[in-house]
Amino acid sequence: IAVTIPKAKAGKGFLRLPHADIGRGTFVVEVVAFGLTSQVKRPYEAFEKLHADISQFIRGLPPEVRLRFNYAVPPLPSATWVWGDTSKTLDERRRKLEAFLQELLLQPAVVHDDERRLFRFLSLSTAVVEATSLVAMRSCGPWLERLWETSTEGDGLALLQHPVVEAALVHAIGDAVQGGASTFSGDAELCHNLVRGIQMLERTFAAGAGGAVVRPEPMLRRRVEVLVVALRESATQLPLRMDDNAT
């Protein structure tokens, strides 16, 4: 995930006088995630709230986690306008807020916060959020069900076909089926998530490249191998019936 703030606009001041307090600005936040681009406008006050929320979240972590985390939320730029060149002041604020967001994205505890504070601020789609979980965890977790639900909507399929997401999906399914029959005994949730993973891999396979980056032959071979093994195991071991969309 890459985040930038390409544009900023000053607000209207209460007195409407040159170089008076003309508001603290509205900023266009642009996010590129797995080849998909989105934008959202946020006023300076929204950055203040995000800063306060993340700071409170970090203070609430267990002491041993905070020690391992060893991270302090970077300060926000000043909210006061300097008398003079307001465009220069606004651009400096834009750059500092951009650096603030980029720094947050480097912190795993912030990115994988259960309440998704940062992702909600960035207004990321459910598909992008769950793909991020899949790439980070590389396992058959609940994110696969939510990814499946979004895979037929909008850019959902294109996201699944992104090489990083597809590689994580292949790895998750491959690990899950490696244990053979023992993988599928007594864990209905794992079985359900695995079914969804298989269905998504089959869907991306059936859709072809779809204009995405061409896969090298080893990756294509691995995708086919994992899909074949997963389908064979699911046909004989999974206590859940795959729906009509699966092969």
Image (spheres, rainbow, N blue to C red):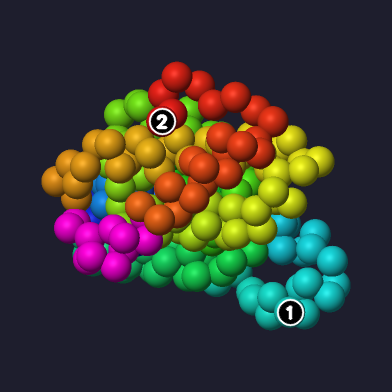
- Residue shown at 56% from the left, 69% from the top: 107
What is the x, y in percent for residue 133?
54, 52
Label disc, if present, on residue 223 of the rendered structure: none
Q: From the top left corner, tell me how far across and down residue 71 is, in percent.
A: 64, 76
Query: Is 99 in front, or is 239?
Result: 239
The residue that disc 1 covers is 68
Residue behind mark 2: 247
Query: Residue 75 at x, y = what percent?
Result: 54, 69
Among all residues in the image, which is located at the extreme top? 244
Q: Which residues are magenta?
A: 213-223
Asked whether, in this view, residue 21 is left or right of residue 134, the answer is: left
Q: Is residue 21 visible?
A: no
Residue at the right extreme, as displayed:
63
* Mark 2 closeness class: few <14, some 14–19, many ≥20 residues within 10 Å: few
Question: Disc 2 to disc 1, how far (Cα)?
Answer: 45 Å
Q: Amino acid at mark 1?
A: Arg
**Badge 2 vs badge 1, beta-carbon distance below 8 Å:** no
Q: Residue at x 50, y 70 (%)?
A: 106
Q: Main secondary structure of the magenta part?
A: helix
**Residue sticking out furthest to the left:** 211
Q: Secondary structure at mark 1?
A: helix
* Residue 14 located within the stretch drawn in magenta: no
- Residue placed at 43% from the left, 29% from the top? 246
**Element type at mark 2:** loop
